[in-house]
Amino acid sequence: MSDLKAAFDKAQADVKTLTSRPSNEALLFLYAHFKQADAGDVQGKRPGMMDMVGRAKYDAWAKLEGMSSDDAMQAYIDKVNELLGS
């Protein structure tokens, strides 16, 4: 396992230890970068207008189209460290 993948896995565990809920913006950032790192470019249909949360998640992920998995992992790790105050 690469060092980046190990750090990404650690960041996934660390994010669960946050003592306060991050902002919606931060949560969308984490979601989108996790999905980009894990699954690549956005897949599936954009949710309908009544599914505002699903739509926001889809849109956040779609903005990362073309970003490499490694770049997405690093951005996720950096954001978790920022939220943890590291």
Image (cartoon, rainbow, N blue to C red):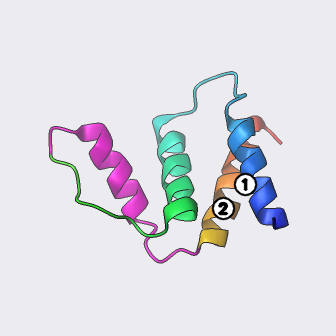
Task: Identify residue type, mark 2.
Answer: Met
Q: Is residue 83 visible?
A: no
| Tags 1 and 2 touching, CB below 8 Å | yes
Estimate how packed mark 1 is, as few (under 14), some (14 to 19) or many (20 or more) residues with alpha carbons within 10 Å. Answer: many
Q: Which residues are magenta?
A: 49-68
Q: Is residue 42 left or right of residue 86?
A: left
Secondary structure under tag 1 reads helix
Q: Position of residue 33 (x, y in %)?
A: 55, 57
Q: Which residue is mark 1?
A: 8
Quadrant of the rendered structure where residue 14 is? top right
Q: Which residue is mark 2?
A: 73
* Residue drawn at the location 51% of the way across and 40% of the way down: 27
Q: Is residue 67 magenta?
A: yes
Give 82 or 67, whichever is nearer the viewer. Answer: 67
Q: Is residue 38 magenta?
A: no
* Residue drawn at the location 40% of the way across and 65% of the way down: 63
